[in-house]
Every structure is written in structure tokens, then in C-alpha cells.
Image (tube, rainbow, N blue to C red):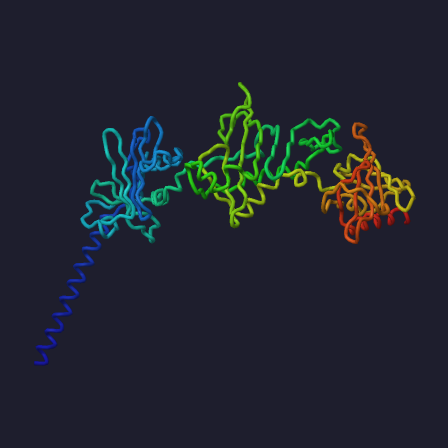
Amino acid sequence: MKRTKKLYILLGVLVVICIATFALSKTEEKKENIKNSDKTVLKVDSDSVNKISWKSSLGSLAFEKKDGTWTYNDDANFPVDQDKIAERLKLFKEFGVTFEIEDVDDYGQYGLDNPECTITLETDDETYEILLGDYSTMDSQRYVSIGDGNVYLVKNDPMDSFNVTIDALVKNDEIPNFNQVEKISEIKVSGSTSLDAKYKENEGLSDNEDDIYFVNKDKEEQPLDTNLVKTYLNNVKALNLGTYVTYNATDEELVKYGLDEPQYNLEVKYTPKSEDSSEDSGDSKDSEAGSSEKTFILHVSAKQDDKAYVRIGDSKIIYEITEDEYKNVTDGSYDSLRYKSVVTADLSDVDSVKVTLEDKDYTIDLSEKKGDVVSTYDGEEIEGTDFTDALKALKASDFTSEEPSEKEEISFTLHYKDDKYPEKEVKIYRYDGTNCLVTIDGKSISLVKRDLVVDLTEAVNAIVLK
């Protein structure tokens, strides 16, 4: 009995081994049906496709081309980004594979019995159906079926382009890159603040040849700090238009989002570079017949619960922006963009500085040596840059038109090498324990921190009392 029992056990083990061997051989046989391939399995002319649709875990989307323009089947008013549809069609213009599995019986093992995405392309003559199955982590490729009985592995995974919602296909408005335009002729702000800055050739209008934007104040042309203007326009360009709240705004929605009467309006007139003259940005429009000048318009709502909304020109799309973005794009006032520095000139253009300190006058000459500005007093070159550094460090902590009422602390007059720049007289008065008041050519301009004035005074004393 024991022998018989052992015999049965051995037979059972043998049967299991045989079954495993058979299964392994079938698996090996199945593996042998997989082969490397570099062939193009699908060629679809993008221009011939008049319908495209797909279904994924994120939903179903369908588009139809009418009069050469793609429209969204569920809403003809949706602004479809034509380029984004073209990008997806381009995937199948010459759809190449890396591996081929022939004569497939079980599509389920590749995830193609219940595909993750089904893409349908239609032309006048033919319909193509592309199924996207499992992702092979071992090969880092996607299993794909095109209905020819085979399964393919592809490196360029279509899932990256088709597993999206309709939001990924909206044609967002564009903001020009103002750093790459030919010229900006005017920057205008209205609403909660106002600004009207115009481009002007600087022929002695200011003491810095880099100044090109001027605001007329009290019948005088006042320069803006070009670097601050560039930073502001870069902040406008950096607006993230990725979150829209509506793409077909009604009058009621304009009221809802505070854009029927925007809190802040920006208008920039610019001339694109010749190669970009066909660019359509924002509410771009020719300012006059035959002109290449365009106008970009931005409307910004008041803040609503730490959010704000913007609209480009008369676009139907309303975008939501963050609180930080709101602060950046509404910071286009005169005080925000004017010079904070008391000394706006490049010191290499200054011939000498006449300083008055405690009723005594001292003249410190400036010259350029090996690219650096050096100071000279009584014919002796001064070591270090404490004096010029202190001049450049004088920056406004606030702007004011208040007349000085306290004692003068220090004053200095800049004499320029080029006589097209008239000399500039700067006087600094006591104001309070923290600030001093600055006047330029007799006009109150700003407050500066008292410690900066102390630094300048000490730098002068170190030179003249040596």
C-alpha cells in the first residue's frame, strides 16, 4: 500500500512537471512571436482628416473640421486651439513602432480588450481606430492596436496627448514678449491709478542715456527707470493664463467677475520685429492704416477673496490669477516705475561733484580708470569706492512733495562731462529720526533713510579730512 501511494505521488509530480513544461514551451512560443520592428504601420494625411475623437478615463472628446477650422462638437463657441489638434494628428502622419506581435489571439494580456484610450480618425474615405492598451514598464512603451490583427509597442506614447480634458485644448489669448519687440511707443494705465508714458529719444531730457520712457509732470518730461519698466512688463508677460473661468463670457459674467468696469487697465502700444509682424497678441490692432504698430490691452478686476480675474482686450475668455500675480500686474503707477535712486546718472558721465557739508564746499573729481570710476580730491586719487557707493546707495523710501522745514544735512551738485546735461543740485534735509528729505533743483522729491545719508557724510569726511 505504501509503495502504491508513493507511486501515485510520483505520477502526480510528473504530471505537474509535464504541464509546467508545456505551459513554459507555449510561453516561449508566444515570446517568439514578438519581434523588433522599425516599420511605419499607419500613414494618415493630417489634412485629409475631418473628424477626430477619443475616449479615455478623463472622458470623451470629439471635434469636426468645418471650413478648414476645427470645432468642438459639444460647443461650437469653444475656442479650439487649432495647433493643438494639428499636433495630435501629426502623431499618425507616420506612426512608427519598435516591436511587433503578430497574430494575436488574446488582446486582454496587453490591456486591449478594455483599452485605456480609443482614438478615432475619419476622412472622407476611411475610418481609423487606434486602441491604447497597457503601458509596459519593462520596455517603457505602450501597447497599441490599429485593427490589423497585430499588437505593437510604441515609444512615442499617444496617451500623453490624448489623456486630457477639454481645458488642454483651449486657445488661450497671447501676451507679447515685450523684450523682443522693435519698440514700445506708449504705456498707458487707467483705473485705480494712472500713467501715460511715451517713448522718446533722449536728447538731454534726462542725465541717463538709457532713459527712453518719459511721463509729462507739471509740463516737464520726467524719466521712468527703464529697468523697472522692463521688470513690470515681464511680470505682465509671466501671467499664467492656464486657469479660465469661462471661455464665452456673457454680460452677466463680466459683472460677476468684476470686468464690466475693471479696476485696472493696461494698454501697451508696440511695434513687433519685422519677422513677427503677423503675430496676433491680445487685442492687437493696427493703430492706423498701413501701420505695423499693435496694441495690447489687459483688464484686471478688483480682488475677490484673494483672487482676481483678467481679460485680454475684448476676448471672451476670463482667467483667474493669483494674489501675487494681481500685485505684479497692477503695479504700473508712476511712483512704482520712476527712479528710486537719487543719483540717476551713470557716474562715468559725471566730471565732478561739489559737496557742501557744514557750510564748507569741497569738489571731488570723478574719472574713469580701467572701466572703474575713481575719485580724486586735491589732485590725490582716493582709495576705495566708499564715496561713489554712498552716492549710488541713496534710494527713496517714499516719494513726497512736502517742503523741507528742518536743517540741511548735506548737499551736492553734479557736473557732467557732456554739457547737454545741465548740472543737478541735490539737497538733503533732516526730516525725522528715520528719514531725511531730498530736493532736486529746489523741488521736493523723496524721503531717504537717514543711515544712507550718514554713510555719505562719513565717506565725504574720510576724503576731505584725511
Task: Give above or below for 238 relative to 203.
Answer: below
Please state if 274 lies on the left or on the right of 40 as rendered: right
Residue located at (66% from left, 39% from top): 337
Viewer-side residue, 71 vs 5: 71
Task: Give above or below for 29 relative to 293.
Answer: below
Residue located at (60% from left, 35% from top): 190
- The location of residue 2, given as percent across then percent down, is 10, 81
- The location of residue 155, given as percent across then percent down, is 35, 44
Please state if 252 lies on the left or on the right of 274 as rendered: left
Farthest-out residue, bottom:
1
Residue located at (73% from left, 44% from top): 396
Which image quarter is the N terminus in?
A: bottom left
Viewer-side residue, 195 vs 90: 195
Viewer-side residue, 23 vs 328: 328
Figure label count: 0
- The location of residue 256, given as percent across then percent down, is 47, 42
The picture quadrant where one finds residue 334 is top right
